[in-house]
Amino acid sequence: MNPKPFFLAVCYFVAMILIAHFFAPSNYDWTQNTISDLGSQGHAYNWIMRVGFIGFGLVLTLGVIRYSGQNATRRYFLLFVAIYGISVFITGIFSAAPIVPVDSYSTQEAGLHSIFATVAGISMSLGIFRQFIVSSNLREWWTRLVFFLLVMGISVLFGVAENHILDLDKGIVQRFLYLAGLAWLVYEERILFSERENKQ
């Protein structure tokens, strides 16, 4: 059975998130803190989550390369996934602002982490929308519409929570956002594999 790189990337990423939680700072609250905070500056074990981001982005990008020659109509979708993967990779290189007390930290590094996290989110949203508008049947159309509405809706909720407009647990909201995005990647890869097997 051929390995599915997107699925492997998702499994790896989820595993690294879970492992990083066991080494989180004492003041880390998963309901309030983000996944990026697990790899924040000043945290002794931040390398665990950083390796998670880097590995996830790398495997995802390699998966794009693998699928890129399969179907020309998928190239735009795969381009968005590649940008997403590369952006997540870079967020692992640059850490978020610290949540533990430190004498000083790099605001530039934290800013770059935030920028590339935003780029990743935009790329995924565009990828979902691209797939939605080129759906080949009604089932794909509805499924992708649900994914798109989930990602956009939860993104709005996350922004509202992060800016304290509403009293929402931003850590929980962000995890639902990740869940929707990762599930979409697995769904799209299942279609890619199905098309590949039908051609053989």
Image (cartoon, rainbow, N blue to C red):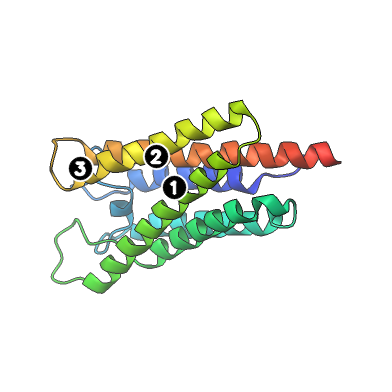
| Residue 106 in view of the camera | no
Amino acid type of the residue that numbered disc 3 sits on in the rendered structure: Val
Give residue 151's mark: 2
Q: Who's the residue at 68% across and 50% down the image?
A: 73
Q: How much space separates mark 1 and mark 2, taking CA atoms? A: 7 Å
Q: Who's the residue at 53% across and 44% down the image?
A: 10
Give residue 160's mark: 3
Image location of residue 25, percent across then percent down: 24, 50
Report which residue position mark 1 lands on.
125
User: Which circle's residue, 1 or 2, is located before the other in the chain?
Assistant: 1
Q: How much space separates mark 3 and mark 2, taking CA atoms? A: 14 Å
Image location of residue 61, percent across then percent down: 58, 58
Dot 1 and dot 2 residues touching (CB under 8 Å):
yes
Q: How much space separates mark 3 and mark 1, taking CA atoms? A: 18 Å
User: Which circle's residue, 3 or 1, is located before the other in the chain?
Assistant: 1
| Residue 162 in view of the camera | yes
- Say if 53 sits above or below 179 in the image: below
Image location of residue 141, percent across then percent down: 56, 32
Image quadrant in which you'd find residue 155 = top left
Which quadrant is home to the N terminus?
A: top right
